[in-house]
Image (tube, rainbow, N blue to C red):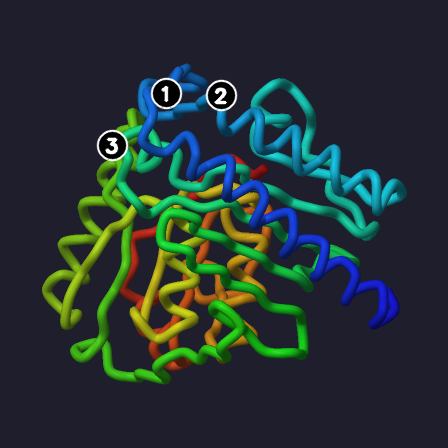
Amino acid sequence: MAEADLELCLSTALKLAREAGGMIKDAFKKKKNVMLKASPIDLVTETDEAVEKFLFSELRKVFPQHRYIGEESVAAGAKVDFTDAPTWIIDPVDGTMNFVHSFPFTCVSIGLTVNKEPVIGVIYNPILDHMYHARKGHGAFLNDEKITVSGETDLSKSLVIGEMGTSPIPEKRECVFENARILVGKAHGYRFLGSAALCMCLLAEGGADVYYTFGVYCWDVAAGCVICREAGGVVLDTAGGEFDLLSRRVLCASSPSLGQEVASLLHQYQPPRD
């Protein structure tokens, strides 16, 4: 895509993220109508559905030839049709469990891929008014101030963000607990926060040094991948190889050596692909 087209994509995404964020903020303290998807911990609310419908509708007005992948559309039966065409990949409310409990670590995530590569990422937490954005080759920003990763290389001095979900899959639970056990003993500190998109942003702004997770989807990480890389971070597969957007696992780090060290320690788990 031409530079002018990408700039239009970014400016449109920023505008719509703020409007979608307003929808999330309006519903944040109100009683939610919560529905279950695949399991008792896989939740969807009316806000998830309304935000995705709004974003797709508005984006299609500007970019009718582009393709679209959204969490709630896929949950309703749409297939993940990932091609080289410009594709918007959207999580309307990342951190739905947090949103349901009014825990202020939730966001809208809007990513754009071209030739299957993430090139634009916009992530907005309307509760804290944190707007992250990045375009490939142009740096990463928080509320229009440039951000960079910490550059930390020593795991013993690193703050690690992992996962501590309550997956019903025994193999996944064992992986989660084993990795926490390993890294709690080696890292400076260990956290789990419930939103993949915002965890990637925290790493991008230097607030953490490692983030890893198994079981995410492309809409959780498409935007964060751009933001993290443009801030100087590395985005890898959890085993240390090349990141695959559809693999449902990701490892981000503030330096290549730190990423490879953590990858060598992780107990691996492979969810079904997107």
How far apart marks 2 and 1 lie (CA) works out to: 8 Å
Left or right of 271? Residue 121 is: right
First in sequence: mark 2 or mark 1?
1
Q: Residue furthest left?
A: 185
Which residue in the structure is indicated by mark 1? 32
Tell me the element at label 1: loop
Q: Considering only vertical position in the picture, is 41 above or below 113? A: above
Q: Nearer the viewer, mark 3 or mark 1?
A: 1
Left or right of 129 in this view: 112: right
Which residue is label 2 attached to? Answer: 46
Amino acid at dot 1: Lys
Q: Alpha-carbon distance for marks 3 and 2?
A: 23 Å
| Residue situated in front as seen by the camera: 53 or 97 | 53
Mark 3 = which residue?
166
The residue closer to the viewer here, 174 or 201, is: 201
User: Is tag 3's residue or tag 1's residue first in the polypeptide sequence?
Assistant: 1
Amino acid at circle 3: Thr
Apparent side of residue 184 relative to residue 263 in the rendered image (left or right): left
Query: Going from the N terminus, do you reach mark 3 or mark 2 first?
Result: 2
Tell me if label 2 and label 1 are in contact, CB under 8 Å: yes
Q: Name the spot of residue 219 as percent of width and height, x first.
A: 56, 44
Q: Nearer the viewer, mark 3 or mark 2?
A: 2
Q: CA distance from mark 3 to mark 1?
A: 21 Å
- Residue at x-position 57% and y-position 45%: 218
